[in-house]
Image (cartoon, grey):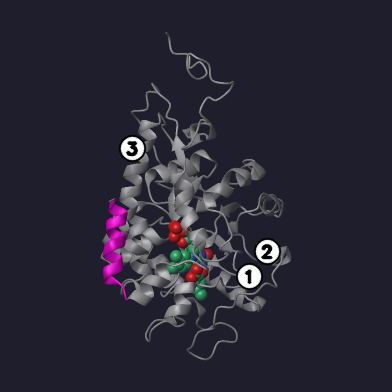
Amino acid sequence: MSRIEELHDRARAALDPVHYDYYAGGCGAEAALADNERAFAELALLPRILRGNDRRDTGVALLGDRASLPVVVSPTAFHRLAHPDGERATARAAAHAGTVLVTSMAATVAVAEVTAAARAVRADAAVWFQVSFQPDDDVTTALVRRAEKAGCTALVVTVDTPVFGRRTRDERNGFHDLPPGLAPENLRDLPGAPPGGTLPITMSPEFTWRHLRRLRDLTSLPVVLKGVLHPLDARTAVDEGVDAVWVSNHGGRQLDAAPGAVRALPRVAAAVAGRVPVLLDGGVRSGADVAAALALGATAVGVGRPVLWGLAADGEAGVREVLDVLRAEFDHVLTLCGGRRPGDLTADMVVRREWPPLPTAGPPTEQGGPRTGRPR
Ligand SMILES: Cc1cc2nc3c(=O)[nH]c(=O)nc-3n(C[C@H](O)[C@H](O)[C@H](O)COP(=O)(O)O)c2cc1C
Ligand SMILES: CCCCC(=O)C(=O)O
């Protein structure tokens, strides 16, 4: 059992089962959820040899920031369900690891407190803000201004939620509301919110590229579009001036018919053609998964649930452990693959586990199957 699986077990034991299900679950029959990990398990790496790669650097440039490893913390809601320190603990852990935390619009700690927690650890800690368009433009604008004021260095706009996916476990458990004392703190004091209360998060299918353009014009922060699977959307996004494209099926929580995210990566990477960085999340659980995604065209990957498991199991220390494990595993795989830096991992180094097809060209002969090239 990997260390991340151990933390998952400890988190399962520590969490209220309803909250565990909210974190762990997907939509529908959880086919997309399962396919995220399966798609990675189907990949294998062809290492390169004799490359003199004793000196390595796992760091990557991400928009204006630098991450010490090509793994960022994906935006996930409601960290205080996992640990009383909630997003503050996650922020400190990401800052210690020297990587980017994407804090959710649905965080249970306000973005200004999240950035303050991160910067108390490291002055240049990078925190990005995840936002979903809200029907009232003034609400979206207020959220963007809040993120700017808090010192976030990029906006991650999530676009795979025109409606919420049907979360089978949450429906069965009747999980609809945060327990008393917890609230989505970024949604306080917004236009239309009750005094002292929070605005509900609205998902709507009404949004178009026009809303993205409006957001682009509203801010000078880099804009990352999260939840892209179709290569034509990736190309449009780049044409519309986004600063990065984030391949994701939302951790298998939206469209159950969606493929495992890494299956969509090669075509998106081809459509983007290096014009902007590509990120990917969904099912990344090991350093080998990180390496495969990078080889297939991602600049960095995100992890969602593993961070929640670390947080629920052991607070800040648990999240640090998850990121440390991924760093160590990634560096180990990079070494074995002959790489010095993440960019040395290239698409020719990734094959399917069932590759190559067995040599069946031509009919069998009395000497056996087709020639293998083995000296006789
Ligand atoms: C409990 C939970 C909450 C999430 N909340 C958000 C969110 O608020 N905003 C968002 O863009 N994505 C959200 N996501 C999706 C994650 O950003 C990410 O795409 C996904 O978790 C990646 O898959 P992984 O969990 O297999 O790493 C959430 C995912 C989970 C599991
Ligand atoms: C209202 C919170 C949004 C969280 C989310 O995106 C998810 O649970 O997948």
Q: Which residue is mark 1?
A: 162
Q: Amino acid at mark 2?
A: Leu
Q: Which residue is mark 2?
A: 212
Q: Secondary structure at mark 2?
A: helix
Q: Amino acid at mark 3?
A: His
Q: Which residue is mark 3?
A: 332
| Residue 5 is a magenta residue | yes
* Real-space Cα separation, disc 3 to disc 2, in angstroms: 40 Å
- In the image, taking residue 245 as reference, residue 375 lies left or right, namely left
Can you give x and y, in whole percent of width and height, for residue 293 in the image? 49, 44
Q: Secondary structure at mark 1?
A: loop
Range of residues picked out in magenta: 2-16
Q: Residue at x 32, y 65 (%)?
A: 311
Circles 1 and 2: CB atoms closer than 8 Å: no
Q: Residues within 10 Å of mark 3 (few under 14, many from 20)?
A: some
Q: Amino acid at mark 1?
A: Pro
The mark closer to the camera, 1 or 2, is 1
The rendered magenta stretch, by its main secondary structure, is classed as: helix
Q: Residue at x 63, y 44 (%)?
A: 267
